Image: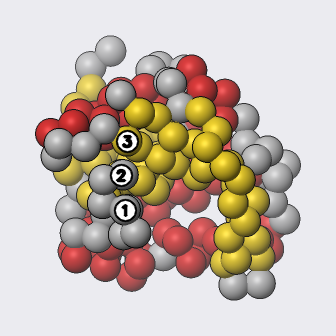
Amino acid sequence: MSYTIRNATPMDVPVIHQIAEITWQDAYRDILSPEQMRYMLDAVYGHETLTSLIESGEQQFILLEEAGVARGFAAYSPRREDEETFKLHKIYNLPESQGKGYGKILILSVIDAVEKSGKNILELNVNRHNRARYFYEKMGFYIAYEEDIPIGPYWMNDYVMRKNW
């Protein structure tokens, strides 16, 4: 398995958007209505939104590439309300790349960055019906609490999962 991890730039926004579009269809088709999925993809993964997050440094995006082709990404930052805790905002791998260990590699890359900043807590949100929850548990995350977050006319019904080391 030959891969590279690199920081994303605004030039990578189209590929990040494309990975999100493909993976959301796979991950959420049985969880969200098509209308809610479209609304949330446009709100969270629109080109302007992604460009702003990357350019401002509000979230650090990393890309995992296999043979020069992006297969997955993650985005993280310190939590605004608690800078001792980092938040993994986004992590997605293309469906055909799942099972290759790339999710683990991305999470370990984020953990390494968090450690280098002198912190040791990473949190993420996962939909309460998303099977990715079990992957996160294998990676050492535990459910800290439940959270319901409004996004426009819809709700994200999530677990907040945490990993301390």
* Most distant residue in the top direction: 1
Q: Which residue is mark 1?
A: 82
Residue 19 as seen in the image, left or right of residue 57: right
Is residue 15 among what the camera can see? no
Q: Position of residue 55 (x, y in %)?
A: 21, 74
Q: Which residue is mark 3?
A: 121
Residue 75 against residue 151 in the figure, above or below: above
Task: Determine the CA span between mark 1 and mark 3.
Answer: 10 Å
Query: What element does badge 1 sit on?
Result: loop
Task: Determine the CA span between mark 3 and mark 2.
Answer: 6 Å
Which residue shows up at 30% across the image and 60% down it? 83
* Quadrant of the frame with the C terminus: top left
Residue 47 or residue 54, whichever sits in front: 54
Which residue shows up at 56% across the image and 78% down it? 43
Which residue shows up at 16% across the image and 46% down it? 117
Q: Which residue is mark 2?
A: 86
Which amino acid is tagged 3? Ile
Label 1 close to label 3 by CB (< 8 Å): no
Which amino acid is tagged 1? Asp
Q: Residues within 10 Å of mark 3 (few under 14, many from 20)?
A: some
Which residue shows up at 32% across the image and 15% down it? 1
Label 3 close to label 2 by CB (< 8 Å): yes
Residue 75 against residue 120 in the figure, above or below: below
